[in-house]
Image (cartoon, rainbow, N blue to C red):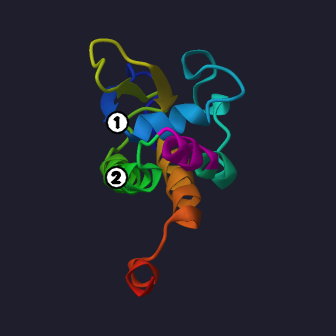
Amino acid sequence: MFKRSEEPEFHNLVIPQPLWEFLTFCEVYCSAACCEDSAFEQHHSLIRRKIIDMNIANQNGQAQFDSAFKQLKDLNEEVKKLNPKTENDQVLVFVEPNTEAHEFQLNLDITPAWFSNWVAVFDEIAIPKAVEEND
């Protein structure tokens, strides 16, 4: 059980590029600095749109997506290891390349579900390696 009287702990988490480029594309309701997790629409159609836009701009959207998905899975595993000590523990989210000041923060108790939801969204888009090899 959480201890209410203790000061909250702060955990730092860095979201690398290109993952942040995909996530920020889904920051449609508000800014994460203001509304935290509520600023984002976690939907595969936005991620697909970002891949298409990157391809049009000759930025190899599928390769960027594959790299971002790997980064997301790694961060998801890192987040699962964080253990809240108080009910108010926070995750300070930093974004590469600016790791001097945090971009936004999340309550630690919702952070694992938030990242797991992103993994599910990205997983809807991922092309299985067996399909790629048969093409």
Q: How many marks?
A: 2
Q: Residue flagged by tag 1: what amino acid is it?
A: Gln
Q: Position of residue 6 (x, y in %)?
A: 38, 22
- Cα distance between the residues tagged 2 and 1: 9 Å
Mark 2 / mark 1, whichever is N-terminal: 1
Residue 98 vs 61, above or below: the answer is above
Whether residue 56 is in magenta: the answer is yes
Q: Which residue is mark 1?
A: 17
Q: Residue flagged by tag 2: what amino acid is it?
A: Ser
On the rendered image, what quadrant is the C terminus found in? bottom left
* Residue ID at (34%, 36%): 17
Q: Position of residue 31 (x, y in %)?
A: 61, 19
Question: From this viewpoint, is residue 117 visible?
Answer: yes
Residue 61 vs 88, above or below: the answer is below
Whether residue 75 is in magenta: the answer is no
What secondary structure do most residues of the magenta stretch adopt?
Answer: helix
Tag 1 secondary structure: loop
* Residue ID at (41%, 55%): 69
Snapshot quadrant of residue 9: top left
Q: Which residue is mark 2?
A: 67
Q: Nearer the viewer, residue 96 or 76?
A: 96
Q: Which residues are magenta?
A: 49-57
Q: Residues within 10 Å of mark 1 (few under 14, many from 20)?
A: some
Q: Position of residue 47 (x, y in %)?
A: 59, 48
